[in-house]
Structure formats: structure tokens, C-alpha cells
Image (spheres, coloured by chain):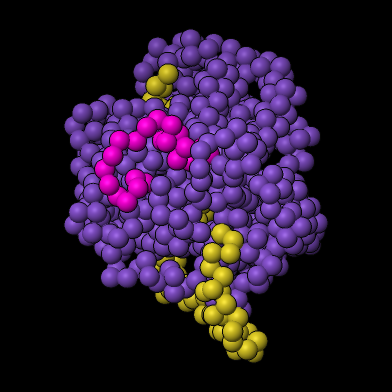
Chain colours: A yellow, B purple
């Protein structure tokens, strides 16, 4: 959304490069630590999460996909229901 | 006309003929349909239609003969069905292989993020070798199950299929073979890793995107040079987002490329500061609208009847009721200051998460911060519900099918629905995924109704009530929604005319999965990177003031949970128990 937020963005650029780099490293570090350290720790700590993680990995299920055409299991489900219900 | 805001796309003055080649909405339609036309010509015009037709015909003849011969589905019947499922135009045409290669996003990884870009022969071999013992074992079990099924079927055939016990025994053995065969196929896929280097194709894709969107930028009278220069950064952020979102644990919690795109972009924008020369490439709406026109190709109305009438009630009756109720609740009880934020959260929560949020936000011209906030809420609650719902369902002993329908109707993202369903059981997965698919199809109708309502009711001058003429409605209406619907209608028409098998081979496994979907994924990833790069934390925080978006989501989702469970129980257990019994 082009220059709409220019003034806001300038708040960040008013700081020195060292400060901006420091902020960037800290913010990215927190995000990366949360996802790649805390979440795996959480997964290892709880049996149910660990089992789910293993199951998703084994079956190739990706919970981050949001539309049905991105999820292979939907097609499998459709074919199964088509075969047992024979709605046509 | 709504109050002017540089964050929203608003057409000024009267509609003109030149709008067709100079306005973003129309250009999104033309660019989207250019992709659609190329894919349809490649697959329907030059695809192996005659060859597929012969194979489908032969397989159907086998199935018809087997159906006439035996009172249950025989091995030959299933094998013929499998042969039809193997027909995929994308894998058998030069165009399919070409577009699949040049649109590949970074792959998945576990420990080294660079594995998502470059994967060596040695790494691929090591991974395949590791998976081989499991495949060999699964293959052996499948072969044994097939032998047992063959013996049982032959025994039933010797009795001319008149012995009910032998028929039942054969059906059970065949079902066992199908399950073992599925496991073997899944294990086999893990032994098929190949070496890759995605860097050259990503560079090629970036150049293609500059040219592709550059055409639109030029026609809108903006500088293609400035756009191209900034686009490299937007594209790099999207690639990095794909890399970060490709990690297995990140994906497990629903944090994929889209979430990482927004997060990474916001971190850059609010710490380093997005360079001014990048901002001309942050064309959020243009990427979203073009992506939505392509998404229209995936909105097939034939999917609505996939699980019969119960599915219609759970997905198409409950959903609009929850959507409208949540919107009214937000306006009358919570007094949400932003109607656009209210409707985007309502649609996101009630319809199907991110895709519905994108479509609704574009239809009502919501601000990018509102879309970000809605998707953020959805991601958090999706992760919680995906883990909590199967646990609760198991704990209370709820039947699998009811649990599946409940999760399918309430968890936002389709991938998370599949994950939660699979964790509960195979039948729960099938029901949950199908209910969600039916709900997914609703985004076209939702986007159209929201766009129309906004033109006729919400965007009135000064908030005063007055009649709005057809011309003004047309002028205000976001035209890209028509492109979205036109793509949906066109593909639904082709789908129904080609027949299920041919449509599956040429449309679903051709024009969609081997064309429009590949670019649609990239367009949305670019839009999320661009949203992040042009979003200010403080601006975003304003929308969260008072926690009203959170309260709206929680109240709406609670209502959704109660209503969906009630409807699923009534439909699957009281009104149509015969359908439930068959599943």
C-alpha cells in the first residue's frame, strides 16, 4: 500500500543504523526463538503434542495450508465419501 | 463515497471506458484471466484429452462389468478406479512440468533452513534410504493383503456370489487390502525424494512476476522501473517467509509462509524501516485481487453436495447465520468502531479463515492492518482449537463423525481441520475435511454479498440513509469480485460438463493444480510480505484497542461451536442417520 504509511515508517528510520539493526536482530531473534526453540520444546514436553507432531509428519499433513486445494487429504476424503455414499 | 483513505482503493468520479485498462480491479481480472486462459488452452486444447478419454472409458467398462458380476466392489473394480485417479494432466504435459518447475517455492526442512533451497543427491539418497525399510515392510503387507483378498474374492466367485458369508469375507479382505495399499503408497512417497536447487527457478519467477505485474503497473500509469526495483525486496521477503514457514514444527502450529511474510515484513518495517524505494512495490491489493481471481478457479459448486444434505446444513446454513450474527453483535453490543474489521473477523472466523479474510477484506476494502489482525487472531485460535478439539471430543466420547463435522465447521484453516480430524480418526478426517471444503466454496458468495452490502448500505455519504442508484452501486462495486465469480462459474461449468473423471484429470489435476493454484499461492505470499513491509506496529495496535476484536472472535466462535455441534447432531444423527451409517 504505497506511501500511506510513510510518516510512520520514518519513525523507524529516524534512529541510528546501529539502533535499527539492534532492534531488527532482537525482534527477529525473539520470533525465531519462539517458533524454533519454544514451540519444539512445548511439543517435546507434552505427549499429546509430540504424538500429533509425529502423526502429521508421517502422514504429510500441513496445518498451515488454508484452502482445500492445498490439502491432499481433502481429495482423499472426497474420494472416500464418493465411494461409500454414491450420491450421483 | 467512503471517507478517503490512502490505505483503501477507492475509484473517484464516474465510471469510464478507460477504467477497463487503467483501474486496478479490472487489471487484476485481465491478468488473472490471462493465466486462466493460458492454463485452459494448454490443458484442454493441447492436453492428452483423447488418451484420457480412452483410459477412462476402459476403466468405467471394467467397473460396470464388475458391478454387474459381484454384489461388492471387487479388486478389479478398485484397480480400475485407481487407474482413473492416476490420470493427471499436469504430470503428462510439457506445460505442466514447465510451470510446476518454475513456480516451485522453497521446500520443507527440519534442521537446516537451506535445505529448503538446495537439496543434494547425497541428502536425497540418505533420506530415501532411511525411508526404504518402512516402505519395504508396508509393500510386503500390501502384497499379503492383496493375496488374501484375491483368495477371498475367488472363493466368493466360485459360489457365484450367492454365499452371503463368503461375500462379506471378501469385502472385509478387500477393505484390508485397500488400507494396506494406502499405507504402502504413503510409505513409497517418502522414498521418492529428489535433489533440487530452487535458486535459479526463483530468480526466473521473480523476473516473470516483475513483467507480469509490471504490465498492470504500466497501465495504471505508475513507474515500472520503481516497481521492479522494490519488487525484488518484496519477493525476497516472500521467499524467506516460505523458507521459515517450511519448517516442520512451524507448520505444525499453523505458522506457514503467510504468517511469516507478515511477521518478517513488520519486523523489517518497524526496526530497520522499509526503504522508500520498496514501497512502490508493496501493491497489496493488486496482488490479492489477482490472486483472488485465480482462486475463483478453485471454487467449484459441484463440491457442495460431497456429503449430501447434512453437509449443506452444517456448512451453508450455520455459516451465514454465524457470520451475520457476529457482525450484528459487533455493531450493536460491542460497538466496534470499524465495520470493515467487524465483517472481516466475522467472515474469517465463520467461513474458512485466511482465504475468507482475504476475500472479504478485499470486497469491503478493509485496511491492511484489519486483515493482519483478523488473520493473526485466526492463527492463534486455529492452533489452540486444532489441539484442544480432538482432545475434548475423545475425552467426552463423542462419535467420530459428529466430532469430524464439528471440527470441520468450526476450525478456520483447512490444513488444521485435516490435522485435527486425522488425530481423531480416519472417518473424522474424511467428514471434517469435506465439511471444510464445502465451507471453502462459500467464499465466493460471501465476497459478493459483502461487496454488494458495502456498496448499497455501508459506504453512504456521511452515513446518512438515502437511496443508492444502480449506476452508483456499479461505480462503487469492487469489480475484481466479478472476475472472481466469473472464474468460479467458468470452472464449475467446465467441471460439470467434462464429467467427474475427465474434470479431475484435466481441470483439478491440470489447469488448477498444475497452473492457477501455483501462481495464486505466490500472489498471496507476495501480498502478505507487502502487508508486513508497509504496516506499522502502532497503527496495528490502534485496532486492537479495548480488546474488542478478541472479544468479537471469542463470542462469535463460541456461538459457532454451539450452533455447529447442534446442527451436526440433528443432521447426522436425527434427520439423516442412514448417511452417517454408510460413512
Q: Which residues are magenta?
A: B459-480
Which residue is rendered at x = 53% and y = 36% of the image? B15
Which residue is rendered at x = 41% and y = 62% of the image? B373
Q: Is residue B545 visible?
A: yes
Q: Does B358 sit left or right of B187 as displayed?
A: left
The x and y percentages for residue B374 are 40, 58
Which residue is rendered at x = 39% and y = 27% of the image? B305
The x and y percentages for residue B39 are 68, 32
Which residue is rendered at x = 68% and y = 35% of the image? B34
Residue B396 inside the magenta-drawn segment: no
Which of these two is toward me, B197 or B259?
B259
Residue B470 inside the magenta-drawn segment: yes
The x and y percentages for residue B456 are 35, 38
Dividing the picture into quadrants, the one containing residue B429 is: top left
Q: Does A81 sit left or right of B496 as displayed?
A: left
Dividing the picture into quadrants, the one containing residue B311 is: top left
Q: Residue furthest front?
A: B13
Dividing the picture into quadrants, the one containing residue B141 is: top right
Which of these two is toward me, B527 or B78?
B527
Please say if B77 is above or below B483: above
Q: Does B352 sit left or right of B193 as displayed?
A: left
The x and y percentages for residue A18 are 64, 89
Please say if B555 is above or below B323: below
* Count of number-bearing discs: 0
Q: Is residue B425 visible?
A: no
Q: Does B394 sit left or right of B230 as displayed?
A: left
User: Which quadrant of the rendered structure holds the C terminus of chain B?
Assistant: top left
Amino acid at each position: 500500500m504505497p506511501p500511506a504509511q510513510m510518516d510512520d515508517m520514518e519513525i523507524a528510520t529516524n534512529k541510528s543504523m546501529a539502533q535499527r539493526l539492534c532492534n531488527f536482530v532482537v525482534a527477529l531473534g525473539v520470533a525465531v526463538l519462539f517458533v524454533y526453540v519454544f514451540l519444539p520444546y512445548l511439543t517435546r514436553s507434552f505427549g499429546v503434542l509430540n504424538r500429533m507432531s509425529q502423526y502429521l509428519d508421517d502422514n504429510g499433513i500441513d496445518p498451515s495450508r488454508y484452502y482445500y486445494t492445498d490439502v491432499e487429504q481433502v481429495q482423499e476424503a472426497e474420494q472416500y465419501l464418493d465411494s461409500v455414499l454414491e450420491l450421483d | 463515497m467512503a471517507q478517503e483513505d490512502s490505505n483503501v482503493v477507492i475509484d473517484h468520479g464516474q465510471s469510464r471506458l478507460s477504467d477497463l485498462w487503467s483501474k486496478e480491479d479490472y487489471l487484476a481480472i485481465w491478468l488473472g484471466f490471462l493465466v486462466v486462459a493460458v492454463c485452459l488452452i494448454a490443458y484442454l486444447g493441447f492436453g492428452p484429452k483423447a488418451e484420457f478419454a480412452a483410459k477412462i472409458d476402459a476403466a468405467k467398462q471394467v467397473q460396470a462389468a464388475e458391478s454387474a458380476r459381484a454384489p461388492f466392489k471387487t479388486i478389479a473394480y478398485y484397480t480400475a478406479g485407481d487407474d482413473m485417479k492416476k490420470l493427471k494432466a499436469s504430470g503428462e504435459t510439457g506445460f505442466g512440468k514447465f510451470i510446476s518447475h518454475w513456480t516451485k517455492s522453497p521446500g520443507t526442512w527440519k534442521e537446516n533452513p537451506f535445505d529448503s533451497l538446495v537439496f543434494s543427491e547425497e541428502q536425497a539418497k540418505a533420506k530415501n534410504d532411511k525411508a526404504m525399510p518402512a516402505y519395504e515392510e508396508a509393500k510386503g503387507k500390501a502384497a499379503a493383503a492383496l493375496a488374501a483378498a484375491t483368495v477371498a474374492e475367488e472363493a466368493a466367485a466360485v459360489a457365484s456370489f450367492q454365499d452371503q458369508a463368503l461375500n462379506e469375507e471378501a469385502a472385509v479382505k478387500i477393505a484390508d487390502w485397500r488400507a494396506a495399499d494406502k499405507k504402502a503408497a504413503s510409505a513409497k512417497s517418502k522414498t521418492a525424494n529428489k535433489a533440487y536447487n530452487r535458486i535459479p527457478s526463483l530468480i526466473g519467477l521473480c523476473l516473470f512476476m516483475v513483467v507480469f505485474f509490471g504490465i498492470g503497473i504500466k497501465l495504471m500509469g505508475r513507474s515500472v522501473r520503481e516497481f521492479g526495483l522494490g519488487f525484488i525486496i518484496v519477493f525476497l521477503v516472500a521467499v524467506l517467509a516460505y523458507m521459515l514457514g517450511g519448517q516442520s514444527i512451524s507448520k505444525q502450529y499453523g505458522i506457514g509462509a503467510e504468517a511469516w511474510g507478515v511477521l518478517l515484513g513488520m519486523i523489517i518495517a518497524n526496526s530497520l524501516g522499509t526503504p522508500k524505494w520498496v514501497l512502490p512495490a508493496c501493491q497489496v491489493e493488486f496482488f490479492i485481487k489477482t490472486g483472488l481471481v485465480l482462486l475463483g478457479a478453485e471454487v467449484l459448486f459441484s463440491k457442495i453436495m460431497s456429503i449430501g444434505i447434512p453437509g449443506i446444513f452444517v456448512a451453508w446454513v450455520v455459516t451465514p447465520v454465524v457470520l451475520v450474527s457476529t457482525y450484528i453483535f459487533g455493531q450493536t453490543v460491542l460497538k466496534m468502531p470499524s465495520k470493515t474489521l467487524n465483517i472481516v473477523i466475522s467472515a474469517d472466523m465463520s467461513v474458512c479463515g485466511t482465504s475468507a479474510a482475504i476475500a472479504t477484506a478485499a470486497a469491503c476494502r478493509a485496511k491492511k492492518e484489519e486483515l493482519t489482525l483478523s488473520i493473526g487472531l485466526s492463527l492463534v485460535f486455529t492452533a489452540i482449537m486444532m489441539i484442544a478439539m480432538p482432545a475434548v471430543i475423545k475425552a467426552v466420547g463423542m462419535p467420530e463423525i459428529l466430532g469430524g463435522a464439528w471440527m470441520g465447521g468450526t476450525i478456520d484453516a483447512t490444513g488444521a481441520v485435516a490435522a485435527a480430524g486425522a488425530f481423531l480418526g480416519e472417518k473424522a478426517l474424511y467428514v471434517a475435511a469435506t465439511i471444510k471444503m464445502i465451507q471453502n466454496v462459500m467464499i465466493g458468495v460471501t465476497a459478493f454479498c459483502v461487496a454488494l452490502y458495502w456498496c448499497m448500505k455501508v459506504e453512504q455519504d456521511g452515513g446518512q440513509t438515502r437511496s443508492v442508484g444502480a449506476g452508483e452501486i456499479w461505480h462503487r462495486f469492487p469489480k475484481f469480485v466479478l472476475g472472481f465469480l466469473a472464474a468460479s462459474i467458468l470452472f464449475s461449468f467446465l467441471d460439470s460438463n467434462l464429467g467427474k473423471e475427465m474434470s479431475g484429470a484435466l481441470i483439478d489435476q491440470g489447469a488448477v493444480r498444475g497452473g492457477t493454484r501455483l501462481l495464486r499461492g505466490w500472489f498471496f505470499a507476495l501480498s502478505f510480505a507487502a502487508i508486513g513491509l508497509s504496516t506499522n506496529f502502532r497503527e496495528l495496535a490502534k485496532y486492537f484497542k479495548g480488546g474488542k476484536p478478541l472479544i468479537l472472535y471469542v463470542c462469535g466462535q463460541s456461538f459457532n461451536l454451539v450452533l455447529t455441534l447442534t446442527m451436526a447432531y440433528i443432521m447426522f444423527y436425527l434427520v439423516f442417520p442412514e448417511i452417517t451409517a454408510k460413512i
